[in-house]
Image (tube, rainbow, N blue to C red):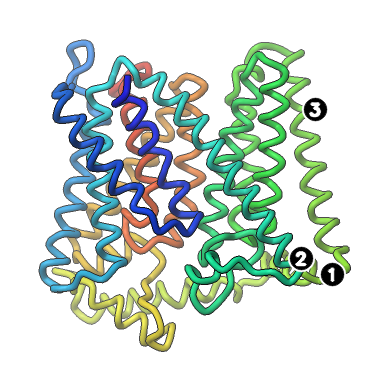
Amino acid sequence: MLLAFLVTLALAVPSLKQSVPLALPIQQVLMIVVLVMTLVHGHFLIRLNGRLRWFALACATLLSLNLVVFTVAIMRAGMWEDIVKQDFVLGLFSLLLLISLSGLMNYVANVIKRYIVYLMAIGCAVSLLGIYKLYLFSQGVMLDWVGDAAGNQYPWGTSLVSDYNFYSSTALIGMLAAMWLALNDVTKLRRAFGWGVVLVCLAAGFFAGSRRFWVLAPLASLSVALISKRMARGAAHSGRAIILLSIFVVAVFCLVFFALNDETGVFGADIFHRLESLNDQSSFSDRTDRWQFALDYLDGGILLLGDGFKYLYVYSQRFTGGEVLDYPHNPILSAAMYGGVIGFVFASLFYLFAMIVAIKLILHGQSENRLLGVMIIAQFFFVIISANSLFSISSFSCVVVIGSVAADLSRNPLYL
């Protein structure tokens, strides 16, 4: 079905947009096409087998409430900067995808499987491009289209965008999707291809320099292995999976060894410094300083009704010298600043709901649904200390959208 294909593609595209500097309005075009086809399709389900679809309805409600608060903040502030415009469009995009997906209950299982494949393909492509970019940099060559989009500072390591955490998030999700396919596919060639993609995404994520990737990659990988069908089918399959995971661990150590013994200095010195910073509490001060400033700002009487998006300019002057707009790097604090108590409550409820969906999928979902749960939790740690608003990293809201629909199809729909 064409609508199912377009919705699946639209759910996966945000992972590409956040990690590659594309000027093309891919999401806006997809949003218009999906909206038209959804209206033509004209079939929306709020019940499943006679029961209300609680998770999908809760997700739609929370997205709508947060979008209303965001819209009111825009009207109060009277501003339409790119960072605000982009988040507003992404919020509409996520809500539209949920509405469209609600009429495709007969195709949801197929949508989820395609979604996982698309994430693997995007992660592989982005990782290969990032590795190529780093190789060129080691030869003294810079890509103009990457540098122009990044502005004053060329992206670090394999990252193609200024925020290497966004890039690493795409690499991590692609790696998890590839690992799940490698552990569950019955074809040897596909399994081998899956593990190849895992190694490519692992290398790209490692050399992007994201400490969150270094911490989350092994934990999330172990989780995917434990939820795979093969681990649940018996000792033979479990032993094979453990061997493959051991190869994965060896690959990590090889990457570390290569980085620390790199004679060119392009990889080694910076990677070593980043690894050392894992034990340095002061290395996290750029985040904690912004959070403390947000708390002080809210303590000045802004908390009740919020102050629109004036905080973007305040942060810009305080932390970047007025060069670029800045923010607390925590979407809940941002929501409190632009929407007051109501914004804080609605944003907090959405992230709480996302964790409930993830736990629900992991405990009661099929193998691919459990993977969605792991992805939600993994991306949460990128979003909660990097994003400006709930809609800034739409790959997270998209996986929550598809996860909420999948949760309604799991056993015991009203209970964890």
Please tell me which residue lies in front, 279 or 104: 104
Write the residue at 37% across / 86% down: 322
Question: Spatial distance from mark 2 to mark 1, Cα to Cα?
Answer: 7 Å
Secondary element at image label 1: loop
Observer-side mark, 3 or 1, equals: 1
Q: What's the amino acid at mark 1?
A: Thr
Residue occupied by mark 2: 267
Which quadrant is home to the C terminus? top left
Considering only order in the chain, which callout, 1 or 3, is on the residue closer to the N terminus? 3
Tell me where residue 78 sits by quadrant: bottom left
Q: Secondary structure at mark 3?
A: helix
Residue at 64% over, 52% down: 205
Query: Disc 3 designates what residue?
Result: 243
Taking 290 as reference, is 301 left or right? left
Q: Position of residue 161 (x, y in %)?
A: 52, 62
Type of the residue with mark 3: Ile
Q: Which residue is mark 1?
A: 264
**Circles 2 and 1: CB atoms closer than 8 Å:** yes
Q: Residues within 10 Å of mark 1 (few under 14, many from 20)?
A: few
Q: Would residue 200 appear left or right of 258 to someone viewing this image?
A: left
